[in-house]
Amino acid sequence: MRKIVLALCILMVLAMTGCGGDKGVNETGYSDEPLIDREGNKLDSADAERLYESAREFLVDNDPDRALRLYAEVQARFPFSPYAAQAEMESVAAHYKAQEYEAAVSAADRFIKQRPRNAHIDYIYYIRGLSNYDRNDPGLLGGDPDKRDTRFLKQAFTDFNLLVENYPQSVYRKDAQLHMVEIRNRLAEFEINVAEYYLRRRAYVAASRRADSVIQRYHGSDSVPRALEIMEESYAKLGLSDLAEDARAILQASYPNYVLHRDEFYRQRAGETPRYALPAMDSPASEGEVIDSDADSDATQAQ
């Protein structure tokens, strides 16, 4: 009998613990604040539609923190309503707007796992890509984050690529492609920085291999011409004259304008005022177009 009573006590404690653990909206940390809409009206007894619309108004009004609380309330109170899925989806965007990129990625992952066939799943991949893209920021350390860690950029590229490959009709596809081009150039430049480091250390084998990886993995990026130069120099230092000549021949044949306008290319990449408009590096050799500074000045004054 004593064992039965003890077992019942344990079950009661577990049940109470379970109820206490199911915090719902309390997990947001806003449970002590009254639920109100943008006009200050109380929402304690509001239905799913009103809660959702109020949350959306906060999101449109660039108040993602308040929006997140109401979205959480919709999901906690009305988990089977059509507004719950919409609230869950827009919570991803709200986290992104609040610059809570890690939370946005986690929310996007949950949504993709639970609702893979949602009609707006392409939007979730897009926001996840933007969140990973923006996670690669300087943070407290400052400086160029691309020189320290590129894992978030790589994940962003994967997110955008999933969107481009799987949802060709998506309205977000074009912007995703533009981000992919930029990420590709940034990742290639990171590899070039590593190859340059090896070159300065006279680790010519490592430098040539790193440069070759740029050509193989990031073909078409802005860093390919410099990768060929590093390979040429490394092979020459290693006494591999045939390979050095091959690298130089490929550079001259594939990027004639890089050879002709090398100094101006790096001046502009460094952010200096252009002396003239550069032709495409892989187009037939040509002179750069002179920039009409007077026209630019007139346009600036007109603005």
Image: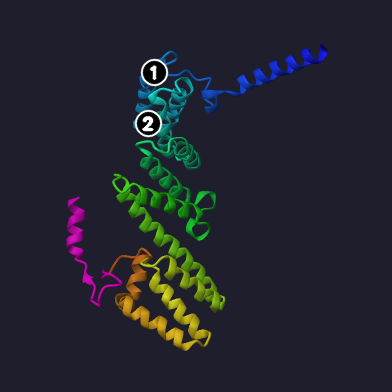
**Placement of the N terminus among the 4 image quadrants:** top right
Question: Badge 1 is on which residue?
Answer: 40
x, y percent for residue 273: 31, 65
Question: Badge 2 is on which residue?
Answer: 59
Dot 2 surroundings within 10 Å: few (below 14), some, or many (20 or more)?
A: many
Reply yes or no: does residue 241 show up in magenta: no
Residue at 51 percent across and 49 percent down: it is 139
Segment colored magenta: 276-303
Comparing 49 with 230, the one in front is: 49
x, y percent for residue 158: 44, 52
Reply yes or no: does residue 295 show up in magenta: yes
**In what element is the residue under mark 1?**
loop
Tell me the amino acid under the disc marked 1: Gly
Dot 1 surroundings within 10 Å: few (below 14), some, or many (20 or more)?
A: few
- Is any part of residue 156 visible from this angle? yes
Residue at 49 percent across and 23 percent down: it is 76
